[in-house]
Amino acid sequence: MNFLAFRCILCHQILSIQNAGLCSKCSRTIERYTYCGCCGMPTSNYVLHCGCCLNSRPYWDQMVVIGRYTPPLSEIIKNFKFQHQFWLDKTLARLLLLAVIDAKRQHFIRIPEIVIPVPLHHFRQWKRGYNQSHLIAKHLAKWLNIPCHSQFIQRIKRTPPQLGLNAKARKQNLRQAFKFANQRINYRSIALVDDVITTGSTLNEIAKHFRQLGVENIQVWGLARAFHT
């Protein structure tokens, strides 16, 4: 047995594609779904907009996600974020890259000029040791041959997690949470990279600012889409 071979992070079988992280069998267990190209809500067909986002239009234009926030994807993300398993970044980034390539075909997205990771408050980043969104964004930028910049946004307010808050509380939670370094941006199209997208409140707050700066196309790229039960 070759113990030095690259193995699947889930079933530990030797990988035929060494850097894939997941074998094809385990990759197929991720709950991918047909979704609206704007808000990520489930739809029966690939559409650019659905009733949900037309009723409450976000400040961004397009969304890309790997799949639903259910096992095994949710467990990989939890290990990546909360168990200090930062080496999972490349596996998750590769899955997101494949989702972006698929969205080019299904939702007609264009590769943006730059990727921007959603920031963490400095205390949370110090405690965790890294910003998980930044690790993902760096891989994507390298593979897509575009810049990755994290200096545009700072999270200056230490807010409690958005999970479990209602819409009003989420909005209050994010009030004056971010500081934007520049009042100008030289890019017309950007992608904001985040981990788990639930209501999208954080992304919407950031996208609103970039929209005001004149960015024409704003995409949000997430590892998973979570839904309230």
Image (tube, helix red, strand yellow):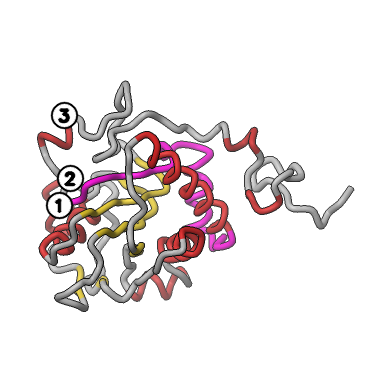
| Residue at image coords 21%, 71% | 185
Question: In the image, what residue type sits under mark 3?
Answer: Gly
Considering the numbered disc 3 on the image, is that residue within a helix, a strand or a loop?
A: helix
Q: Which mark is residue 166?
A: 2
Q: Which residue is mark 1?
A: 169
Q: Which mark is residue 51?
A: 3
Q: Which mark is residue 159?
A: none
Q: Position of residue 97 (x, y in %)?
A: 47, 49
Question: In the image, what residue type sits under mark 2?
Answer: Asn
Question: In the image, what residue type sits under mark 1?
Answer: Ala
**Location of the C terminus (image quadrant):** top left
Q: Contact, CB < 8 Å: mark 2 with mark 1?
A: yes
Q: Earlier in the sequence, mark 1 or mark 3?
A: 3
Which residues are the magenta region? Answer: 60-87
| Residue at image coords 18%, 61% | 215
Q: Position of residue 39 (x, y in %)?
A: 25, 40
Mark nearer the viewer, 1 or 3? 3
Q: Rate crowding at label 2 as few (under 14), some (14 to 19) or many (20 or more) other CA atoms within 10 Å.
A: few
